[in-house]
Image: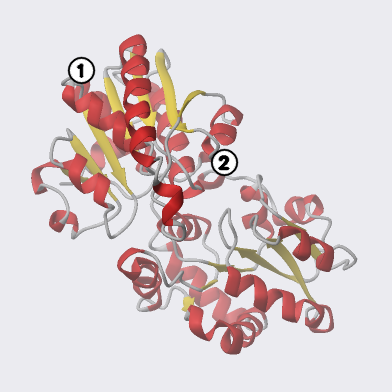
Amino acid sequence: MNITDDANNEDVANSPFRGVGGKFIIAGGGTGGHIFPAIAIANALKQLQPQAEILFVGAKGKMEMEKVPQAGYNIKGLDIAGFNRSSLIKNISLPFKLIKSFYQVRQIVNEFKPVAVIGVGGYSSFPVLKYAQSRGIPTFIHESNSFAGKANIMLGKKATRVFVAGDGMEKFFPADKIVVTGNPVRKNIAASTVSREEALRFFDLKEDKVTILVVGGSLGAKSINEVILAHILDLAPLDLQLIWQTGKTHADVYKERGKPLENVWVGEFIVEMDKAYAAADVVISRAGAMAVTELCVVKKPVVFVPYPHAAEDHQTVNARHLVEKDAAVMVKDSEAHAKLFPEIITLAKSASLQEKLKKNIAQLAITDADIKIAREILVSVQ
């Protein structure tokens, strides 16, 4: 089901939930694709209900333990880990960690006493929602992808509501629990007022050159990074400049390569993504659900290189959805070394192609998913 347009357009300043308290746990993380939507939901809950108390629960050692406090929220860490497919010996301790995490969850939930628990994906969300459901606490799931994870599918059976990005999710969740909301986007991106000029100054780049933004996620994208590394010296003669988020893997190598070049900014992770998007004329990206959602909102011409090992190859599905609407360009990961750089140059040098892609991708933008989700949660627990 969809929340009505009238509800979506309601002025949040006149929210009927203002002045009403409530404690909420938001559980999950592991990647920016889980963490940033979670923070957006938390901010929307506080916007509609300023007296709300929000506690995050994540996995110790994962990026949520850093990013959530930076956003101004408290977080508790669980001693939990996911299944390691590359080294089976490392999975020996998994049952013990899972049991320990349930004891930790019980203590956290019983002390905090939430009125609802929201799961955003990542293995730390499972024990929190599972325990909450055993206690009869309302639980909500946000599933950003077109193919739901196994943990979310199991939890969805007893969830109060399941928030999804688009249609066709009845094959994973009970139809009467589904609410189509889109994916939440960080407010500093969705409502950014950063100018291109200001953004380029931030990255110490020039205003009169076409700027290419390369992003591959927190760990990086091997195929994309290898192509950029191989062609980084070809950009200046073409009057192009680069903002390159490398991810953690081999970041030092990439930083060293880009450091002496005036037309290149290179870093492991971009905190100020609103500025990166504002500076960019063209974007090269994986096609995870949140990357796609953000690029629709910021209306940028993009070449997608879908991660080929995503569950059910859903990144290719995500990218193809936009390609079929003339809203993006796609290069297969297996063809990146041969085809990606020519596609980048073609797009960077064609103002008309950029305009066509910008116009079409803008029509797919959803900017109020966070408010839709927060409102549905608050209505359900009143």
Q: Which element type, helix, strand or loop, lies under badge 2?
A: helix
The answer to which image quadrant residue 209 occupies is bottom right
* For residue 97, side relative to residue 226 (left or right): left
Helix, strand or loop for disc 1: loop
Q: Residues within 10 Å of mark 2 (few under 14, many from 20)?
A: some
Left or right: residue 111 compared with residue 137: right
C-alpha distance separating marks 2 and 1 = 29 Å
Three-letter code for the amino acid on which mark 1 is drawn: Gln
In front of the other: 204 or 193: 204
Q: Can residue 21 be seen here?
A: no
Q: Position of residue 246 (x, y in %)?
A: 67, 61
Does residue 296 show up? yes
Quadrant placement of the C terminus = top left
Q: Residue at x 52, y 24 (%)?
A: 73
Q: Name the residue that disc number 1 marks.
A: 382
Vertical side of 158 occupied by 354: above or below: below
